[in-house]
Amino acid sequence: MMSSLQSVSSSGRTSTSEDNNNINDNEDQEMTKLALASFQAREEQIERKKMEVKGKVESQLTRAEEETRRLVRVWEELEVLTDPMRKEVAMVRKKIDVINREIKSLGQSCQKKEKEYREVLEAFNEKNNEKTQLTSTLVELVKESEKLRMGKLEELSKVLNPKR
């Protein structure tokens, strides 16, 4: 007996199970080749996508580095710009504080002297009014005294010279 069974294919050819095994092996090999080709195509696609993403990342990193350098330059310019101004501003603020204290002291002194001035002016005006009143009184008294003396002198003159 033969170890392989014979079968008739649709083409009319006789085939054995060994032939069937060979065909199955060929089909398996071809499917394996197709699977490998498909796998390799996907791997290549993944690699291309990976390279594309890597390129984008590198591009963004380059832009980020450039932006970082630009920001560092701006920051350095700001530092240089603010330092002298801070010192000047602090110095001017200290001067303003000193002057404010002086102004406060001078203001208090001025208020005290204005109060003293008003008090002295009021006393001056009172004394001036008193002097004016006394002067008026004196003028009246002097007039009255002169009148009385003139009257006395006329009386004495009449006594000395009785009717002439």
Image (cartoon, rainbow, N blue to C red):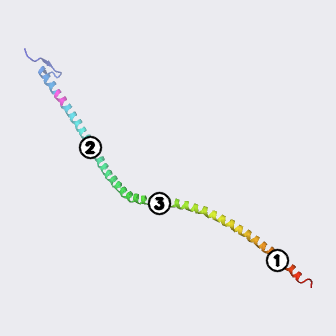
The magenta stretch is: 28-32
Left or right for 154, reference 132:
right
Alpha-carbon span between mark 2 and mark 1: 134 Å
Question: Which residue is nearer to you in this view: 90 or 163?
Answer: 163
Q: Amino acid at mark 2?
A: Lys
Q: Which label is found at residue 157?
A: none
Residue position for label 2: 54
Mark 2 touching mark 1, by CB under 8 A? no
Residue position for label 1: 149
- Total marks in image: 3
Task: Report helix, strand or loop for mark 1.
Answer: helix
Q: Amino acid at mark 3?
A: Val
Picture quadrant of residue 13:
top left
Write the residue at 13% across / 20% down: 17
Outermost residue toward the right in this view? 163
Residue position for label 3: 98
